[in-house]
Amino acid sequence: MRLARLSPAMAIVLATAAALMPARDAGAQARSVVDTTFAFSRSGAIEVTVPSGDIIVTGWDRDQVRVHGSSQYGEVQVDASGSRLTVTVMAVRNRLGETRLEVSVPAGARVVMRALSGDLTARGIQGELTADATSGDIVVSEIGARASLTTTSGDVRGRQLAGRVTATAVSGNVVLEDVAGDVQANTTSGTIRLIGVRGPSVKAGTLNGNVEYDGTLEPGGRYSFLAHSGNVMLHLPPTAGAVLDVLTFSGHLESDFPVTLRDGIRPGDRIRFTIGDGGASVSAQTHNGNIIIRRSPRANR
């Protein structure tokens, strides 16, 4: 008898289907389980979506993808080729429980993660990263390319990031540490903390909370910080050079750097002054709060 040969893509689909095993837990609740590994391009595209549950994506130094996890009630579906992977969870009989998926991918792959309700975690990804949660935290580290991080209800936390970072939270805090690249950070209700940032373009704004920046000022760089109800705190290297344009309507300005003011300055007046060689442009504004500028022990490099 002659056996039919399978294409690589079909072999992956069949191997994945064999790994999807219905199981029963102690409460006799249906559970879909997946545990499969297959060859994958180092520059491939990954997309993982869950309605309810957590996603963890980790980069590794292999030409392989591993998908491991389970879903209570839902069915884990894996659609894969040698360069594209899509993982989704579908409701069974209109029921969905908690899901947890752990995906190991080649470090250079492009990754998209989405969850309606659940936390998103990514680390060791050197390709572009998109993480989008409706209700849940986003935590990323060791990201080597552009990252877009968005949550409606939850916090965004990132460290050791390289490339342009866009971080948005509607109700939650945004904390980014050790970033080499441009940053745009926004939240409606929460605090923004940007620590150890090294990039020529930084924009940060919140309606209800404080904005804190501790980073370099690049020659020719542009930096904008806005808090409607809260303080703006800037920690700048002693050797920094910038033209600062600051405005507070019902607060005051504190600065470790010398500020020359004209006579008759009043609350609500815009204050413009220069530190160092004036190479960067810095705007800081708050409606109901103070603007505090301190010398940071960090070198401007």
Image (cartoon, rainbow, N blue to C red):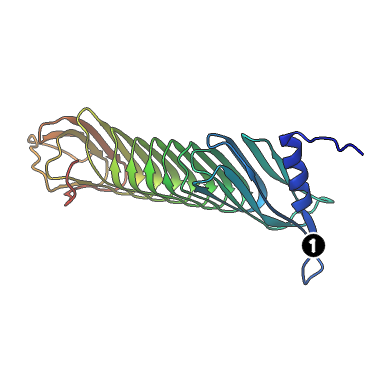
- Horizontal side of 260 relative to 7 (left or right) equals left
Q: Which residue is mark 1?
A: 23
Of 152 and 102, nearer the camera is 102
Residue 48 picture location, percent across and down = 63, 43
Of 6 and 162, nearer the camera is 6
Amino acid marked by disc 1: Ala
Residue 213 picture location, percent across and down = 28, 46
Q: Quadrant of residue 63?
A: top right
In this view, which residue lies farthest toward the bottom? 26
Image position of 202 with respect to 61: above or below? above
In this view, which residue lies farthest toward the front? 1
Quarter the C terminus occupies: top left
In this view, which residue lies farthest toward the top? 220
Residue 273 picture location, percent across and down = 13, 34
- Horizontal side of 246 relative to 51 (left or right) equals left
Image position of 7 with respect to 122: above or below? above
Quarter the N terminus occupies: top right
Q: Residues within 10 Å of mark 1 (few under 14, many from 20)?
A: few
- Horizontal side of 257 relative to 250 (left or right) equals left
User: What residue appears at the point 76 percent right and 37 percent down from the top-left corner?
Assistant: 10
Image position of 160 with respect to 130: above or below? below
Secondary structure, mark 1, is strand
User: What residue appears at the point 78 percent right and 49 percent down from the top-left corner?
Assistant: 91
Residue 237 picture location, percent across and down = 16, 45
User: What residue appears at the point 70 percent right and 44 percent down from the top-left corner?
Assistant: 88
